[in-house]
Image (cartoon, grey):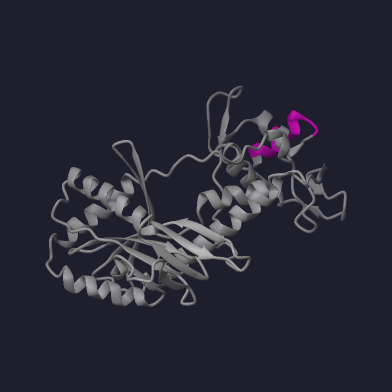
Amino acid sequence: MISVELKELTPPLRLLKTQALKRRLIPGHSKLPVIEKNIAIRKAGYWGEHLLSKYLKQLPNEKYLIIHDLHLEHKGFHIQIDNTLLSQNLILPIEAKNILGTLYFDDQFNQLIRPNEDGNEEVFEDPRVQARWHRSLLRDWLDTNGFQKLPLDYLIFFASNKTILKSYRNGTIRDAQKICKARDIFNKIYSLEKQFNQTKINYNSLLELGKLLLKHHSPDEIDILKEFGISKNDVRPGVRCPICLHIPMRYERGKWRCPICQTLSNETFLESLDDYFYLYKPTITNTEFRDFFLFPTVHIAQKKLQSLNLPSMGTTKNRLYLLSPRKVPPCDLD
C-alpha cells in the first residue's frame, strides 16, 4: 500500500519557463550562461524532490496524506513548502535539497558552506532557517483556520548519500535530528511518530485540512523575461524545427518547413504554443497568434487558431483564446 498524494509532484513552473526562454533566446545572448546555470540548479532541485517523492509514496496510506509543492499566502507572506506530510498526529513539512560535495553547517551565521576544488567557498542559505520560518507561518495559518490541535515539526532531506555533512567549527550540528539523507528519511519519520504518538484529529478532519490547503494553494505569478531582464525583442518567434531546432520554420500550405534541414511538419507548432504560454501569458489573440507564428495573413492565422478548438472569451473582434500547456512529461533529470 502506498500513501495518498493529494497534489502530485510536477516539474516546477519556473523551470519550465526558464527552459522555454533558453530555447527562444537569440543565439549568443549575454544572459545565456546565467540562464543555463539557473536551469541546472533547478533541475538538481527537482531531482531531489523527485527522489523524496518516491520515498514518501512508500509510507502507509492509512497514516499519511502528501501535498507536493504547496504555496500559501498568509498575512502578506508567501509560504512555499516542497513536501507537506499530513497525519492525524502531526503535520510535517519536508524541504528537499540536492547539493553534492562536502557541506559545512555554520551555526553562527546560519549558512551552508561548500569548499570547491579551485579553493573558493560557495555559500548557501541554511535550509533550517527557511524551514523554521515556514513552520512559524504555517503554524499561524493552521491556528487561524481552526487546526490548533495538530503539532507541527519539520525535516531537511538531502537526496544524495554522497553528500557529506559536517559542522563548520568542528562541533555538533545544531538540530542534527532534523536533517537526513536518502533512505534515512524513514528513520526520521518513524522517530517522530514515537514522539508525536497521540491522535489529534479524526481522518475526515484530516481530509478536510488537505482540501483546505489545496483550496488556498496560490503559486507566485512568474514573469520570466522580467526576472532575467530580457527584452521581448531578444526572444525568437516562430515554430521551432523538431530536428535541427532552428527557429523559425516557414509556413507552407498548412505545414511548416525548416529552411535549414528541410524538415516538413504539421504538429510541431503545438510545442511553440506552449512556449508562448510559458514566456508571455495564458491568453492569446488572433493578432498575437499571427505575429508569434509568423503567418502570412490574418485569415490563415484565424483559421489555424480556430482549428485548435481552444476555449475563448469576448466578442469576435476582441476575442481572447485561453491557453494551457499540454500535459508535461517528466523533465530530463540527468
Q: Nearer the viewer, residue 289 or 235?
A: 235
Where does the magenta region start and end? 296-306
Residue 21: x percent and y percent?
Answer: 65, 46
Q: Quadrant of the C terminus?
A: bottom right
Residue 330: x percent and y percent?
Answer: 55, 63
Q: Nearer the viewer, residue 151 or 308?
A: 151
Residue 230: x percent and y percent?
Answer: 65, 38
Residue 182 visible somewhere in the drawing: yes
10 w.r.t. 56: above or below: above
312 w.r.t. 119: above or below: above
Which residue lies at the image location 67% right of the left edge and 49% below the top edge? 22
Q: How many marks?
A: 0
Residue 271 visible somewhere in the drawing: no
Which residue lies at the image location 55% right of the left edge and 23% below the top edge? 315
Q: Quadrant of the N terminus?
A: bottom left
- The image quarter containing residue 9 is bottom left
47 w.r.t. 299: above or below: below
Answer left or right for 109 relative to 162.
Answer: left
Answer left or right for 80 relative to 272.
Answer: left
308 w.r.t. 131: above or below: above
Which residue lies at the image location 28% right of the left edge and 37% below the top edge? 75
User: Magenta stretch mostly in which secondary structure?
Assistant: helix
Residue 126: x percent and y percent?
Answer: 40, 57
Answer left or right for 331 relative to 113.
Answer: right
Answer left or right for 247 relative to 56.
Answer: right
For residue 171: magenta? no
- The image quarter containing residue 180 is bottom left
